[in-house]
Structure formats: structure tokens, C-alpha cells
Image (cartoon, rainbow, N blue to C red):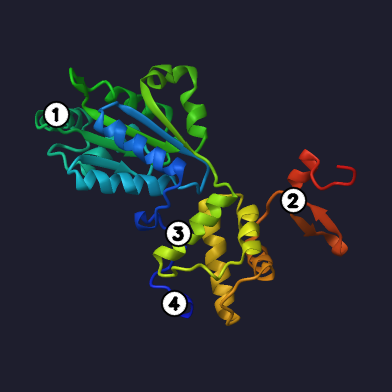
Amino acid sequence: MYNAFFGLTASPFTLSPDPNFFYRSPQHEEALANLIYGVQGRKGFVVLTGEVGTGKTTLLECLRDYLAYQRIEFAFLFNSRITPAEFFEMIAYDLDLKCNRSSKTEVLFALNQLLLQQAHVGSTAVLIVDEAHNLEWDVLEEVRLLGNLESRQGKLLQIVLAGQPELDRKLDAPNLRQLRQRIVLRCNLRPFDEQQTIEYITARLEKAGMRQQTVFPPEVLAEIHRRSQGIPRLINAICDNLLLTAFALESKVTTVEMLDEVCADMRLEWPGMRRRGPGGTVEPFPGDRLYGRGLPGS
């Protein structure tokens, strides 16, 4: 709606995981390099974790683009709330295995044949599981067993597990110690610091056609970082709403007052914020009480 008003050629802050808008922060660059290295080196298991909205799915999309370009066979499981039977059925569909896809035995035979064919031509295959923290224990055990498929040159199937920090805690469980020992690479995505937030916003606007960023003044950028807490998904949502608000007010520059309105509409809360309680009294953010921030005498 606002693209023409700001001279943009695309929507810069869409929430979809578009690799074209991938911001190569040092940690995202390192994580993607580790994912690719894990596949190329046939390392077996790679784990990618991060809080909600830190860019895990975008990284996986970048990995999928790389695999497609290299013509490496892969299966991508986006729904992790599945039974073991559904797990094998989804693998069979994604890899287009010629077998009875409702039979675990036939899927395993067909999968093993595909992996051997790939190894024969010097290639491999990859299983990517998003939202892996939701996997049930019996499905995780099936994942571990698939990791046993190997040759003298390395693992036949490369497995990438991506999920929220709960995934790390689940993998630390005593009953998964055999799986944990097979994990060669671990990557963790953290929220941006303030400078990275500014660079992220500037980079997305540039890719959308705004070479010189003028719509977000320094004080607004600083507040966007503070209120989003450096989480890319929240940054996108805030900036998208800010541009829409500025467009509605026919302003080419956003303000902190606009940001206040956007954050109120989004029901955002952040450390250090102040809320109006009953009778107009100012109430601190709940976390401030816990950590003693911004309270009398603190």
C-alpha cells in the first residue's frame, strides 16, 4: 500500500522468510556456513536453535536454495507434530520414493537405495526438520536411527534439526544421549544488538529500492531496537506498521509518537516500558519489578 509513496519497488518488511532479503549478520553468516559445511562434509547431524523470530526459517530457506542449486536431494519437514508413521510418509513424499509410502519398511529400503545411489555419484541427501523442538520422543528416536546410515566416506543422510531453545534442552535429556553424541555442529541465533538492528533495517530498505534511508531518524531506530529487543520478526512488524502509519499521515519521516501508537496497537511490551494503569497511574513493565529496573531507589 505504501510502496509507491516511499519510492519502494518491493515490500521491505514482509514477515515471510524471503532469502532475497537475507541480512548477512556475522552470526547468520556463520550459521549458514556451518549448515552448508555440515552437508558438504557429510557430518551427519547439525542443530540450529534460536528464539522465536530470530531468522531460523529464513536460514533454512537459504539452505534449500543452496541444495536445489547443487542438485542435492532433500526432504523438508515443516510440520513437526507428527507420528513416526507420518514422519516416514512425509520423507517418502518429499524425496519422491517409489514405494508404498505407508509402509515404514518399504520407505526405509527405498531411502537406503536412494542414499547409496547418491553416494555412488559423489553426492548426498539431506533431511531438514523445522520446529524440531515439537518432535515427540519416539520420532526423535527414528531420526537418530536414520543417522546410522553411513559408508566409509561419511554419513549417507545429513540431518538438520532447527528449533527454539527447548530443542537444546530436549536433546540434553538422558534418553537422547546417543543422538546428542552424534551432533557434530551446533548453531545458535541471538537477537541483534542496536547496530545490527540499524544495519538490518537499512539493508532491507535498500534491497526494496531505498538507497538512502531517510524514513527512520536515529531516535526512532534506537527505540525500534529497544522495543523489538533485537528480534528480526518484531523489527519487521514494527517497521511495516510504522511505514503504514506514516503513509496514512502523508509523512515521509516516522516519529517516536508514531512508534508509540504502533506499539500500543501491537500490544508490545518491553523491558523499561511504562503502562497506564487504572486511574491513569503509571505502571512499570512486569520484568522491572523482577530485576529492580526503573523503580524508586533502584
Please tell me which of labels 2 and 4 falls first in the chain.
4
Residue 206 lies, in percent from the top left, at 43, 64
> Which of the pair 92/76 is nearer the observer?
76
Question: x and y percent of residue 62 in the render?
Answer: 33, 48
> Which residue appears farthest toward the right when viewing the image?
297
User: In what element is the residue under mark 4?
Assistant: loop
Residue 87 drawn above or below residue 264:
above
Marker disc for residue 203: 3
Which of the 4 quarters of the picture holds residue 253?
A: bottom right
Give the quadrant of residue 248: bottom right
Kind of residue at disc 2:
Gly
As shown in the figure, which amino acid type bears the numbered disc 3? Ala
Mark nearest the camera among 1 and 4 is: 4
Gap between marks 2 and 3, in whole Å? 28 Å
**Whole-percent x, y for residue 182 in the image:** 36, 21
Of marks 4 and 3, which one's residue comes earlier in the chain?
4
Structural distance between the alpha carbons of marks 2 and 1: 55 Å
Binning the other alpha carbons within 10 Å of mark 4 as few (below 14), some (14 to 19) or many (20 upward) gives: few
| Dot placed on the residue nearer the N-terminal end, 2 or 1 | 1
As drawn, the label of residue 119 is 1
